[in-house]
Amino acid sequence: MALFEVYNDQGIQQVTAINATFYLKHKVVGKDLPLQPGEDPDPHLSVYRSFYFEAEFPIIALATTGIDKWTRVHGLYRLQGNNWRVDWIDSSSDYTKPTLEQGVDTIVYIFDLRSTADPNNNFGLNLYGPDGKCTYSSNQAPFKVLDVFEVPGMYNLEYNPVLSSKVAGRQLAVISNRYRDFYAYNDPSDAFYVYESFSTGVGQVKISYVDPQTSTFYDPGANMDGTNDRKPMVTVVDVTNL
C-alpha cells in the first residue's frame, strides 16, 4: 500500500506516492545561451548550444519557434552523478552572422523522473515517497504525451505526419527514439549518415532528414531481412503554456 493513492471512477490509479512520473524540470530558450563553434567548415553543422543541468533520468523534448525552423540534439552527456550536458543545433546556428541576426529557433524542455517541488510551499499538493523525495506536485507540469507516430521511410527530405485530434491548438515538442546522427544501411558497404531534425508549431510537427554524403535515403521498411526495426518512433509532448 502506497502512502497516498488516488483512483478515478473507473478504478484506474491516477496518483500515488510510490510511482513517480516525469515533470518539467528545465525550460531552456536558445537565445539565452551562446553559440559554441566547432571544427566543421559548414556553420550549420559545426555550431551548437550547450546547457548544463542536474537530473536523475532526463528526457529531452525539442520545440522550435515556428514550423519553418529546425532543430536536433547534438549530444546528451552524463558528466558525473546526476550532472548532465545537452547540446543542440538549430537553424539559427550560424556564427558567421551577427548575434542579432542569429535569432532563436529552439526551446529545450527537460523532464525528470522526480518532482522538484519546493518542500516549503504552503499551497497545492505535494506527495513524498518512502525515500523522502517528492514524487508528485500539483504545482508542476507533468510529462503529457499527446501522440506517438512512426516514420514510414526516408525517401523524402520532409515528413509531415498526420497527428491525432488531441494536438489541435496545442504547442508541441517532440522526442525521437533515434539518436539524431545515425548510420542507416541495407548493405554495410553502403553506409551513410542521416541527420534527423524537427520543426514544431501549434498542432504541427515536421521531420526532415539530410544525408550530407550521398543525398540518398534509407527506407526502414526495406531491410534485407524484411524487418522494420530501423523505423524511428516519435513522441509528441504537450508544452502549451509551460
Image: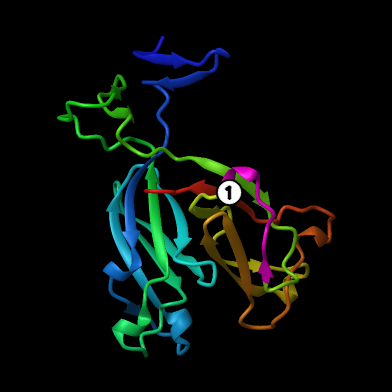
Name which residue lies at 27% across and 28% down: 133
Vertically, is 208 above or below 165?
A: below
The answer to if 211 sits in the magenta stretch is no
Is residue 161 in the magenta section?
Answer: yes
**Hey, what amino acid is under mark 1?**
Ala
Image height of 136 relative to 197, above or below: above
Residue range in magenta is: 158-168
Residue depicted at 48% across the width and 53% down the height: 171
* Residue 177 location (% of width, % of height): 58, 53
Residue situated in front as seen by the camera: 215 or 30: 30
Identify the secondary structure beneath mark 1.
Answer: loop
| Quadrant of the frame with the N terminus | top left
Q: What percent of the width, then of the height, locates residue 156?
A: 73, 72
Q: Residue at x 53, y 50 (%)?
A: 169
Q: Position of residue 221 (x, y in %)?
A: 80, 58
The residue that mark 1 highlights is: 168
Could you say which is closer to the camera, residue 35 or residue 163? 163
Please name whichever residue, 226 or 96, is drawn nearer the observer in this view of the structure: 96
Left or right: residue 69 versus residue 125 is right
